[in-house]
Amino acid sequence: MGPAGGARRVRAGELEKGGAMRTQLLVILAAAVLLGGCAQTLLTVNRVESPYRDLSTLQKGDIVHLPTGRLLTEEELLEFLGGYRVVYVGETHDNVFDHDVELRILKGLAERFPGRVALGLEMLRRPYQEGVDRFLAGEMGEREFVRTVWAESWGPQSWPYYREILLFARENKIPVLALNAGRDLTRAAVRVDELENLDPELRDRLPEDLDLDDPYHRAFIQGIFGGHSKGTSHGDAFYRVQAIWDETMAETAA
């Protein structure tokens, strides 16, 4: 879920319903929120004449329930999201409106489910989880965190986009998951013909359920990224890395 031109969209089919007490907020690629809280009654939407809406008519800040075309208030949105364990919040990494939406959703869910929401970011890599934990515990200052953790995981220039989100998590004792695969693993995966040829230490860090033989996932990735030399060794390497990213983030969040 993320704004296009500032408007926010909810696609119910992309959310996973669950009633477990575990709660996490996950922000990945199109940035995600993982929430697990008490199961809520799903928002009842009134019937409308058409389930479709001309998105060009939306105003900044409008929230659309895509299956029905109904406009939601922010309170209705948060009530709706409260019925799911996993909520994905989509983003464009350098879009300030997207990050404002992420922060507002995080704040709203944390207020409704105190102590039951966690935040996971694609931008943070698994090997830096200890540094993330130290920052959240107040054992590491912001400057050191940006230099030794954020810059190494994602790049220092992007920190201003995520600063308020991470500071809110720290101030409110919200756990943060470093979701993504280590850079050393993905770089090594590019250099080998087969993942079996990775060094044993790196091979042990591959996600357990990694599957490179799913033709539908491969076609999906190629469709998103324009092929990337599909059918070539370069294309295979690109797909390996993307699959490692996706499966590592899913495994970390699970």
Image (cartoon, helix red, strand yellow):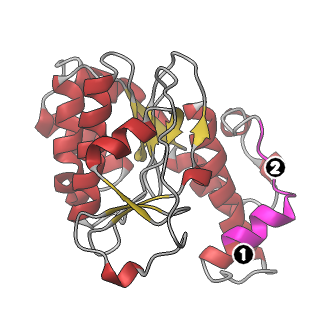
Image location of residue 72, percent across then percent down: 34, 54
Q: Which residue is mark 1?
A: 235
* Element class at badge 2: loop
Residue occupying image coordinates x 54% and y 73% = 50
Image location of residue 150, percent across then percent down: 29, 45
Q: Nearer the viewer, residue 12 or 100?
A: 12
* Quadrant location of the C terminus in the rendered image: top right
Q: CA distance from mark 1 to mark 2?
A: 16 Å
Residue occupying image coordinates x 16% and y 54% = 160
159 part of magenta stretch: no
* Element class at badge 1: helix
Q: Nearer the viewer, residue 239 or 19?
A: 19
Residue 4 sits above or below residue 132 on the image: below
216 part of magenta stretch: yes
Start-end of magenta stretch: 209-221
What type is the residue that disc 1 sits on?
Gly
Whether residue 125 is visible: no
Residue occupying image coordinates x 70% and y 84% = 229
Direction from residue 142 to residue 209 in the image, left or right: right
Q: Which mark is residue 211?
A: 2
Residue 208 sits above or below residue 73 on the image: above
Residue occupying image coordinates x 67% and y 78% = 223
Whether residue 211 is visible: yes
Direction from residue 15 to residue 110 in the image, left or right: left
Image location of residue 237, percent across then percent down: 70, 66
Residue 79 sits above or below residue 197 on the image: above
